[in-house]
Amino acid sequence: MLEYIEVESKPKADSCIIWLHGLGADGHDFEPLIEKLDLGDRSVRYIFPHAPMRSVTINEGDEMRAWYDFIPHSETGGTSDIEESADLIQELVNAQTARGIAHDRIILAGFSQGGVIALQLGLRLEKRIAGIIALSTYLHDALKTEEQRTDANLALPILMVHGTQDPMIPIMRAATSRENLIRLGYDVEWKDYPMGHQVCLEELDDISAFLRSCL
């Protein structure tokens, strides 16, 4: 199982957010956001996994923490890595349900590569979860997603947030993903900000509101 950081907002958590970092970061990347999220009295367990170390093509083959090898200008590149990483996150989901957290109290969240994995797994789970947060990211292989998605998570709430000036993942790629998700029947909430490939303070309010509505 992946190594991860675990933080509980209050004792006896009854819900869980599994939050996946982006390329080259690690589980500590989003840990500071906990204090900035307004979730009221909800008792939440945060799981921040560390991606495996792997060779990354755009980094001249050097190793770094990555959920998959990013292949520029490829719609389906990295599929085997993505499927492998989704299986690893599935293990974390299973571990949480074994500890008493119901599937419908689990949210998958991810930034950039992490968001790709959150969407990859969340739309294919056999049991319904509470929602998906997809930050500065995109849907990998919409055609295969349409074939493999499960009825359990149809109309699932999904929050997509993107920067209008993102140089890493152009906003049009994210917007195309949004339209594909809507076409497939998911309940997509879209927000964009005048920012690059990052998280800005303004979007934390939107993330907080989404989490409160799902939990």
Image (cartoon, helix red, strand yellow):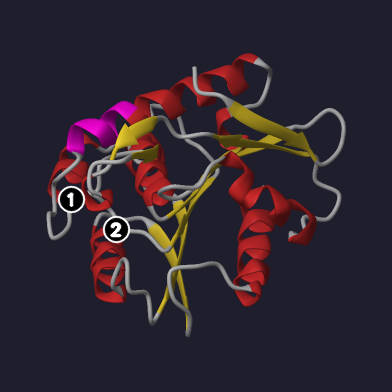
Magenta segment's dominant SS is helix
Start-end of magenta stretch: 79-84
Against 31, residue 138 (above or below) is below
* Amino acid type of the residue tagged 2 in the rendering: Leu
Residue situated in front as seen by the camera: 41 or 163:
163
Relative to 6, is 137 above or below?
Answer: below
Is any atom of residue 90 visible in this view? Answer: yes
Query: What residue is shown at x 29% (from left), y 39% (from top)?
Result: 68
Residue 105 horizontal side relative to residue 7, left or right: left
Decide if residue 66 is in sight here: no
Q: Secondary structure at mark 1?
A: loop
Residue occupied by mark 2: 181
Q: Is residue 189 above or below residue 164?
A: above
Q: Nearer the viewer, mark 2 or mark 1?
A: 1
Is 160 above or below relative to 148?
below
Residue extending farthest bottom: 194
Q: Position of residue 8 (x, y in %)?
A: 78, 36
The residue at 74%/52% (across/down) is: 34
Percent of width and height locating residue 116? 35, 48
Q: How dense is the environment of label 1, judged by Cα within 10 Å: few (below 14), some, or many (20 and up)?
A: few
Instruction: Tell me the element at label 2.
Output: helix
Is 172 part of what is drawn in magenta?
Answer: no
**Residue 33 spot, x, y in % from top left:** 70, 56
Asked which quadrant contains residue 102, the reply is top right
Q: Nearer the viewer, residue 205 or 126?
A: 205
Q: Nearer the viewer, residue 20 or 45?
A: 20
Label 1 belongs to which residue? 71
In percent of width and height, residue 95 lies at: 57, 18
Kind of residue indicated by mark 1: Ile
